Amino acid sequence: MNYLSKIKAAGFNIEIDGSDLLISPCSKLTQPQLAFLKTYKAEIISELKKQQTVNDKYDRDAIDDRHNCHECRNLINCRCITQRFKPVDDIPRRCSDFVSGRKL
């Protein structure tokens, strides 16, 4: 179990603010929990930054749902088999028939 999991399992929410940890509800922290946080502060911040990076990437991907035709499984021999045309694959576009993971 990683540090964040232990903190969340104990019923706390944790965020970072620069080099500080923001924990709520802080009034419920016991002395052993406070010692744990102080001891592993650098590791906890590192885990939070990694999680934040993943969340930021997910948010960007969720906002931009456009794709290039060459990324789609429906493109065979440079033709889209569902839309029945030969796309100009110069810009990303939205397509209701897009299927991720083209096999090469």
Image (cartoon, rainbow, N blue to C red):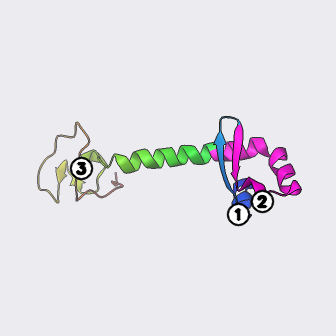
Residue assigned mark 1:
11
Residue assigned mark 3:
94
Instruction: Give the amino acid at mark 3.
Output: Arg
The location of residue 78, given as percent across then percent down, is: 19, 47
Secondary structure at badge 2 equals helix
C-alpha distance separating marks 2 and 3: 48 Å
Instruction: Give the amino acid at mark 1.
Output: Gly
Instruction: Give the amino acid at mark 2.
Output: Lys
**SS majority, magenta:** helix
Q: Nearer the viewer, residue 55 or 25?
A: 25
Tags 2 and 1 touching, CB below 8 Å: yes
User: Does residue 60 appear to the left or right of 2 in the view shown?
Assistant: left
Q: Nearer the viewer, mark 3 or mark 1?
A: 1
What residue do we see at 39% from left, 51% from top? Answer: 62
Magenta residues (range): 20-48
Secondary structure at badge 1 equals loop
User: Does residue 94 appear to the left or right of 58 in the view shown?
Assistant: left
The location of residue 4, given as percent across then percent down, is: 70, 55
Residue assigned mark 2:
28
